[in-house]
Amino acid sequence: MSNAPKDASMTLLYEVMHRPLDPSYAAAAEKRRQVEAAGGRLGASPLWRVTSLLLAVGLGFTTITGVMSLRGRAEVAAGARVLLRDQIVERTEQMHAYEQSIVEKSDMRDQLQESLLQYSSIENDVRVLRDRVRTGSVAVEGPGLVVTIKDGPNVESSRDNRVRDVDVRAVVSALWGSGAESISVNGKRLTPTSAIRSAGDAILVDLTGLSSPYRIEAIGDPQQMETEFVKNPITTDLLELESRYGISTQVARADTLKLAAGNARTLIYARTLGDDSSLSSDEKSQGKGIR
């Protein structure tokens, strides 16, 4: 006798109470139970086992290969870093040795020059000292004029507000014309061969980079230089730079200025004026004298 309800409306309730699993799921579960009861395992065929083993071996080999490759690269990089560090240390020691050698040879040169000057006349001594002052190869001290030029505001957003190399060159030229005997820019002594130029937004004096504010110191008669500097057309240009770009300029007298020696050109050989008998024909045609 069937236990199913006679009323069709009770069919859903009967299915939920007595057969909660889906027929397909129940069939799959029964099949799994039968396979396990027979001592087997669902899907565990020999082919599947061999395939799984090969995949595991391949993945393991790939992982080991990757790890060894990364480790090898790390060792190479570490070796390169050590090599570069040793080279930097070696080059730094060589540089210090060269600098020390330059200092020693410069001291020896000065001593030889002083010993030679002991046998010269006072006129020659004065002339040599005057020439060294003009070439900027000796430190000087005395009264003078200081001109300071400073960048305008917001130089990051407006490059026109920066002081340019042409501005510094114009001020230096005006100071030379006003009677300056020696000039330095931010402590960098100017010589007859000094070059003031730009590299991007930076201003270079020879190979030294400078930054705002630019302090231009000139040794000479302060009153005369200030009078002549004010008369120079550069003052009008400086006023226009301040009104248009905010580039400020200050001019002040100084009772004492100390300017360090600069790097003068190296004398290769010399001869007495009017005597060219010791020169070869090539040297005469090329006009060699100093480098």
Image: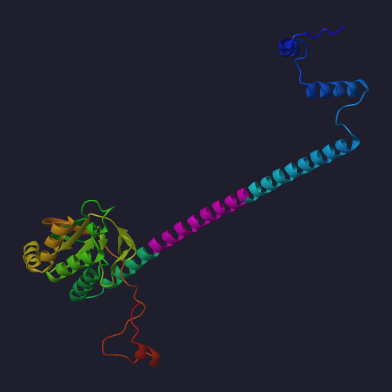
Q: Residue at x 25, y 67 (%)?
A: 136
Q: Is residue 136 left or right of residue 100?
A: left
Q: Is residue 82 magenta?
A: yes
Residue 46 in percent (x, y) is at 90, 36
Question: Would you place residue 242 above or below residue 109 in this image?
Answer: above
Q: Residue at x 27, y 61 (%)?
A: 188
Residue 31 in percent (x, y) is at 87, 24
The quadrant of the image that shows the C terminus is bottom left
Name the outermost residue toward the front.
7
- Asked if residue 180 shows in the view, the reply is no
Q: Residue at x 77, y 40 (%)?
A: 60
Location of residue 99 by image quarter: bottom left
The quadrant of the image that shows the N terminus is top right
Q: Is residue 1 left or right of residue 281?
A: right
The residue segment tinted magenta is: 77-104
Name the outermost residue toward the right.
38
In the image, 233 versus 230, the foreground residue is 233
Q: Residue at x 19, y 66 (%)?
A: 172
Question: Would you place residue 173 above or below residue 31 in this image?
Answer: below
In the image, 138 versus 48, the foreground residue is 48
Residue 139 in percent (x, y) is at 24, 62
Name the colour scheme.
rainbow
In the image, 66 versus 201, the foreground residue is 66
Residue 10 in percent (x, y) is at 72, 10
